[in-house]
Image (spheres, helix red, strand yellow):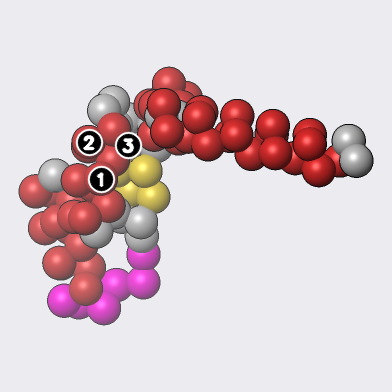
Amino acid sequence: MEVVRQTRAIFNNYGFDCQVLAASIRHTAHVVDALLAGADIITVPFGVLQKMIRSPFTDVGLERFLADWARVTSR
């Protein structure tokens, strides 16, 4: 991600009006690294995006919310 960091620094130093794109990111940790390095846009495969938004905690929370909602709307 050093190239992203350097590119961001150069663009900022010279006041270039453009965005830094990090492409073909293959791991969720690299998404975070690219964002911290200053990338404005990141391209990822759909599987990486799914890994970023899915977790056991999210699944449990969603199940509880849906169960609570079903109880509220069944009254």
Mark closer to the observer (1, 3)? 1
- Looking at the image, the residue that sits furthest to the front is 75
**Residue that label 2 marks:** 29
| Res 23 label | 3
Q: Amino acid at mark 1?
A: Val
The residue at the point 42 percent across, 33 percent down is 57
What is the three-letter code of the residue carrying label 2? Ala
Q: Nearer the viewer, residue 40 or 16?
A: 40
Using the rendered image of the protein, determine whether residue 49 is visible from the camera's viewpoint: no
Residue on which the image places disc 1: 32
> The magenta stretch spans which residues?
13-18
Report how far apart the C-alphas of labels 1 and 2 lie in the structure: 5 Å
Above or below, 64 against 32 in this view is above
Q: Amino acid at mark 3?
A: Ala
- Sequence order check, earlier mark of 1 and 3: 3
Report the front residue among 19 and 63.
63
> Alpha-carbon neighbours of circle 1 within 10 Å: few (<14), some, or many (≥20)?
few
Residue 52 position, x and y percent, is 39, 34
In this rendering, is residue 37 above or below 57?
below
Specify the quadrant that holds the C terminus: top right
